[in-house]
Image (tube, rainbow, N blue to C red):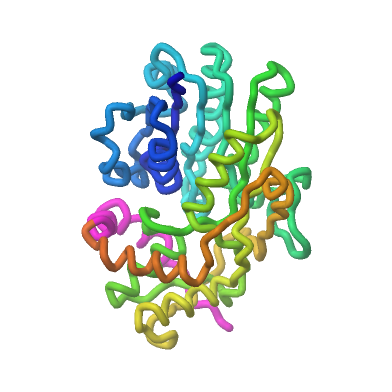
C-alpha cells in the first residue's frame, strides 16, 4: 500500500536529508515537498531525487491555505513539518517572518490535517524552546522558557500541535532536536559559516567569550530520529533528540581552525554577544532512547567529514554567500563592537 507523505521545508537543511531518507527507506512512498524557497531553501539540496517519479515539488508558503491544499492534492497520510524561520540572529532583526511561518504556518497545516483526515502529523521543533539550561538537562515536560523571538515562535507552534491533539484528537508528534550540523546547511549558522569563512581565509565572528554550550547532533542522526519517532512514537507525545556532544562555541571554533589550518589569533574576531544569548542547552533523551533511537555518528569524525564536504562542494556554497547573504552578514556583524575578554 502506498503511503502519501507531505514534507514541508524539504529543500532546507534537515528537511532535504529527511526527503532522501524517506525515499531511500521505502519503495511504496509518494512524497510531496512544499517549500517557499526563501533564502535557505535550495532546490540543489534535493536535485538528486528530483527525477524520482515518487517525488513531487510544490513551491508555496505553509501559511497560505491554497498552497497547502495544492500540495496535499487528493490527500496525504502523513505531514512532517520542517518549514520554519530558524536563525535566532535573524529573528532579532526581523521577527515578523518568524511569527508568520512558525505560528500561523503551523496553524494552517494543522487545520489542513484536520480537513483532509491526515493520520499522522509530526512537528520538527528545537531545544531552544526550553531556554537557558544552566544545570542538568531538559526533559520533555520541562517548562517552556524561550528567550528569543525564534524560540518563542517555535514554542507557539508546539503548543498548537499539542492543543490540536487534545482538542480534536489529531494524531500529532513533536521532536525537539539539539544543534544540528552536516552537509547542505546554509552558511549562516556557526559551523557552516565558520568553515566556509576559514576555507576562504576569512575571519570568523565569535560571540563574547565563546563559552556558550551547545549539544551537537549530526543531521543524519537527527533525521533518523525523526523517522523513528514518526513510526514508533505515541500520539500527543514530545521526544527530545540530542547528540550527547556538549561543546562550547570556542571548542568548536578551535576544532574548525585545526581542520582548516588557520590560527586563532589571526582568524577569530570576538564580537558583542547577541541580546538574550542563552548560555547552555542540554536535552534529556531517555524517552527517545526508550523508543529505540540513539545517535550513531561520532562527533569528531562527523565534524571532520563535514569540513571535508564543504571543501569538496564550494560550487554549492560559494554562490550562496553573495547578494542577500552579504547584506545580512554586514547588518549582523559590521556594527558589533569588539568583545573585551
On whether residue 110 falls in the magenta region, the answer is: no
**Residue ID at (30%, 59%):** 326
**Residue ID at (39%, 54%):** 185
On whether residue 318 falls in the magenta region, the answer is: yes
Which quadrant holds the C terminus? bottom right
Taking the image as shown, residue 335 lies to the left or right of residue 110, namely left
Residue 123, horizontal then vertical, whole percent: 57, 35
The residue segment tinted magenta is 316-341
Residue 141, horizontal then vertical, whole percent: 78, 43
Q: Taking 73 as reference, is 138 above or below it?
A: below
Residue 109, horizontal then vertical, whole percent: 52, 24
Q: Taking 41 as reference, is 63 above or below it?
A: above
**Residue ID at (69%, 18%):** 169
Q: Quadrant of residue 132?
A: bottom right
How many discs appear? 0
Taking the image as shown, residue 226 lies to the left or right of residue 21, namely right
Amino acid at each position: 500500500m502506498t503511503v502519501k507523505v507531505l514534507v514541508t521545508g524539504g529543500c532546507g537543511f534537515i528537511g532535504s536529508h529527511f526527503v532522501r531518507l524517506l525515499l531511500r527507506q521505502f519503495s511504496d512512498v509518494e512524497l510531496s515537498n512544499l517549500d517557499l524557497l526563501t533564502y535557505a531553501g535550495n532546490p540543489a539540496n534535493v536535485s538528486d531525487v528530483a527525477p524520482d517519479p515518487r517525488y513531487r515539488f510544490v513551491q508555496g508558503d505553509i501559511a497560505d491555505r491554497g498552497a497547502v491544499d495544492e500540495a496535499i492534492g487528493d490527500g496525504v497520510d502523513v505531514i512532517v513539518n520542517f518549514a520554519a524561520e530558524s536563525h535566532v540572529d535573524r529573528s532579532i532583526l526581523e521577527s515578523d517572518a518568524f511569527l508568520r511561518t512558525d505560528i500561523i504556518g503551523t496553524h494552517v497545516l494543522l487545520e489542513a490535517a484536520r480537513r483532509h483526515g491526515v493520520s499522522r502529523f509530526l512537528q520538527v521543533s528545537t531545544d531552544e524552546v526550553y531556554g537557558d539550561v544552566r544545570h542538568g538537562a531538559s526533559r520533555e515536560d520541562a517548562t517552556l522558557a524561550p528567550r528569543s523571538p525564534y524560540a518563542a515562535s517555535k514554542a507557539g507552534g508546539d503548543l498548537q500541535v499539542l492543543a490540536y491533539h487534545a482538542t480534536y484528537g489529531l494524531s500529532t508528534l513533536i521532536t525537539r532536536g539539539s544543534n544540528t550540523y552536516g552537509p547542505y546547511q546554509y552558511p549562516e549558522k556557526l559551523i557552516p559559516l565558520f568553515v566556509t569563512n576559514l576555507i576562504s581565509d576569512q575571519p570568523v565572528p565569535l560571540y563574547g567569550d565563546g563559552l556558550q554550550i551547545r549539544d551537537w547532533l549530526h543531521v543524519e542522526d537527527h533525521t533518523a530520529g525523526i523517522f523513528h519517532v514518526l513510526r514508533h512514537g505515541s500520539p500527543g507525545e514530545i521526544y527530545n533528540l540530542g547528540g550527547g556532544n556538549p561543546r562550547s562555541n570556542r571548542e568548536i571554533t578551535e576544532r574548525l581552525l585545526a581542520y582548516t589550518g588557520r590560527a586563532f589569533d589571526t582568524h577569530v574576531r570576538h564580537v558583542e554577544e547577541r541580546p538574550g544569548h542563552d548560555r547552555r542547552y542540554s536535552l534529556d533523551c531517555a524517552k527517545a532512547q526508550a523508543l529505540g533511537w540513539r545517535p550513531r555518528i561520532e562527533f569528531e569524525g562527523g565534524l571532520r567529514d563535514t569540513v571535508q564536504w564543504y571543501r569538496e562542494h564550494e560550487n554549492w556554497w560559494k554562490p550562496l554567500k553573495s547578494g542577500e547573504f552579504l547584506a545580512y552578514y554586514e547588518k549582523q556583524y559590521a556594527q558589533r563592537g569588539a568583545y573585551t575578554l
